[in-house]
Amino acid sequence: MTNEELTGLLQALPLRQLHDLTRGRVHRHFRLGKRRLIEVILSLPPESRSLLEVDVLKPKRQSPHQPSLENSPQPFVAKPTQKKGRGKAKLSASLEPPITVSELLDGLGVPTAQPFHADPWQIEAISKLATNDVIASVPTGSGKTYVAIEATRRALEQDQTVIYTSPLKALSNTKYMEFSQLFGADRVGILTGDRKDNAQAPLLIMTTEILRNLLYDAASGQIDVRLNTLGLVILDESQYLADPERGVVWEETIIFCPSQARLLLLSASIGNPQDLSSWLTSIRAVPCHLIHHQNRSVPLRAGYLHPDGVMVPFFRTRDITKGRGFTFHPETKRLLAQYEGETLGHRNRR
């Protein structure tokens, strides 16, 4: 159904019936007027809009005050679309047989041990750190920690000081224990707001605020000798640059970082890594090399657990791949409709 066709049908309905149609689909629908309600309906996701279209086309003898989802839910009707790419993916997914629960859970568990082989992007990141700053913006579970460990190992072999920062004390404590096991407790120190151990070690773990304060002291003339040999600064969870309150700490840390040190920024959720790479290149003595991909080493799967204990796949397909279209599993839609009808229906009958 085109926007024009749906708009015409909606304009012919009374406002009260529009509110009944959007109950459970549009947040705070009761505050919207008729024109705004129609605009919101036209912008609904394809699955919700398709179900609403079915409700609009139901016979008029149905009571307009009865929420449509209280009755037997209508199956999702896949409609051809002229859009390219994402729309075609949704249509093709809706035509394939939906997966079962056993297929959703297939393969989960501890994998068999296999020899480790670094991915090409990991090798690229480590090699580029010899001459460039590096941003590694890759999905969770891709192996960013391996890049940090191997880059640290190479810097220590060249008698350079390495600083590893994280936004949280708890994460700093975890990395302190992990790096102590890898490089030896005598070579690793930690500096946080409430902990200071082995502060003269060549590898220091700290929060980003602590490093920013050290760089402040160096800029004001209180030179810390450790900064003279600083060869690598690792900023973990660097998406905090966008944090409204704490982002300035990461920004100032990058600006004040000694030019001889290489920066390694790690994150799984930077929204605009290209812009960040360009900014680093414009303010630093060396260019910044960006490594960015969305290929997950560990696939994501989604299931829906109904309040009565029934578990079903959330989507028709098993793995979630960013950038592709999805359609709800038929059983998930049925359970969602059932739950919505039970809860919202009881509220409307008051």
Image (cartoon, rainbow, N blue to C red):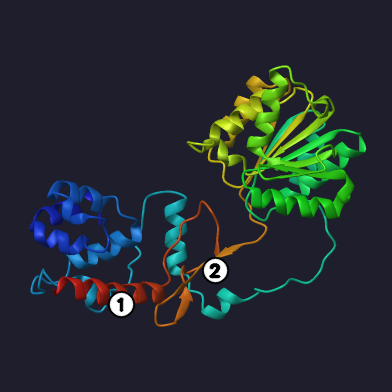
Of pointers 2 and 1, the one earlier in the residue sequence: 2
Nearer to us of marks 2 and 1 is: 1
Depth check: give the residue in front, 46 or 214.
Answer: 214
At which x and y percent is residue 286? Answer: 73, 23
The residue beneath circle 2 is 318
Mark 2 secondary-structure assignment: loop
Write down the quadrant of residue 235 in the picture: top right
Depth check: give the residue in front, 28 or 197.
Answer: 197
At which x and y percent is residue 330? Answer: 39, 74
| Residue under the image location 34 percent in, 62 percent down | 47
At which x and y percent is residue 37? Answer: 19, 51
Task: Look at the image and tell me in which quarter the C terminus lies.
Answer: bottom left
Residue 226 visible at all:
yes
Give amino acid for label 2: Arg
The residue beneath circle 1 is 338
Number of numbered markers: 2
Asked if 85 appears above or below 333 in the picture, the reply is: above
- 250 relative position to 55: left or right: right
At which x and y percent is residue 280? Answer: 64, 26
Give amino acid for label 1: Gln
- 39 relative position to 151: left or right: left
